[in-house]
Image (spheres, rainbow, N blue to C red):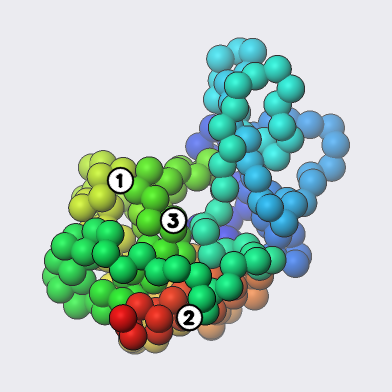
Amino acid sequence: MALTQATSAHADSIQRIVHPDGRVEFTNVKSKAQPRASSKNETVYRYTDEHGVVAYSSQRPGNAAFDVIRFHCYACDPESSVDWYNTPLFLTPFEREIRTAAAEFDVDPALVRAVIHAESAFNPKAVSPVGAQGLMQLMPGTARELGVDNPLEATQNIRGGVDYLARMIKRFNGDVRMATAAYNAGPGAVGRYKGIPPYAETKAYVQRVGILHQRYAAN
């Protein structure tokens, strides 16, 4: 769940830089150099610096152990080489959790599965540098508002994510494209632009969720 209209993140002082073409860069490493646009691979390195501080950077650390992170959702890269019409679907994981949450909040389970696929590729332990967590990539503040105590626990994460998705669908009068744009970029951005925001990553996300939704509905 990326908030594309934001230009910075408070967690760990991570700066989120949105470029005019929709490319996004995250870093909390201060540098005199000008901000560098993300590469098409959108790789971010997480490591502990010499002061014991967890750091995130698009520059590979030279003398520290690190984890490689995809900082944005699986389906948001405008230059993704994935064939969204033919990529394998996740038809059986978390079937009970998805069915239960979809029924509770009256959301198409195929749409739920499409959003999970787009957000995390069904990785329940997915974490982004700005703090989005779990299958549906809930931000900590959003998770708290939704009553999710542990976003990395699949049942809680799915229920919270579906609750939020249902709220976006209601807010935008049943328009699924607008709702999924709001899930990605935030409802404020959708409201300001009176439609899908002109962010490359959000436009890609909405298109790919739509493709996945159709495919999951047909299975």
Numbered disc in front, either 1 or 3: 3
Q: Quadrant of the C terminus?
A: bottom left
Give the Cα separation between the discs numbered 1 and 3.
13 Å
Answer left or right for 15 relative to 183: right
The structure residue drawn at horizontal position 75% and vertical position 65%, both measured from the top left corner, is 20
Q: x, y (%) of residue 214? A: 40, 84
- Mark 2: secondary structure: helix
Question: Splitting the image into 4 quarters, where does residue 196 fall?
Answer: bottom right
Task: Name which residue type carries label 2.
Answer: Ile
Crowding near the residue tagged with mark 3, few <14, some 14–19, many ≥20 C-alpha atoms within 10 Å: many
Frontmost residue, 125 versus 197: 125
Q: Which residue is mark 3?
A: 120
Crowding near the residue tagged with mark 1, few <14, some 14–19, many ≥20 C-alpha atoms within 10 Å: many
How many numbered callouts? 3
Instruction: Confirm whether residue 145 shows in the render.
Output: no
Give the Cα separation between the discs numbered 3 and 2.
16 Å
The structure residue drawn at horizontal position 68% and vertical position 53%, both measured from the top left corner, is 41
Name the N-terminal-most of marks 3 and 2: 3
- The residue at the far top in this view is 51
- Mark 3: secondary structure: helix
Answer left or right for 207 relative to 187: right
Q: Which residue is mark 1?
A: 151
Answer left or right for 144 relative to 25: left
- Mark 1: secondary structure: loop
Frontmost residue, 122 versus 173: 122
Frontmost residue, 132 versus 195: 132
Question: Splitting the image into 4 quarters, where does residue 101 fall?
Answer: bottom left
- The reply to whether callout 1 and callout 3 are in contact (CB within 8 Å) is no
Placement of 42 over or under 32, stated as above or below: below
The structure residue drawn at horizontal position 31% and vertical position 43%, both measured from the top left corner, is 152
* Residue 211's disc number: 2
Numbered disc in front, either 2 or 1: 2
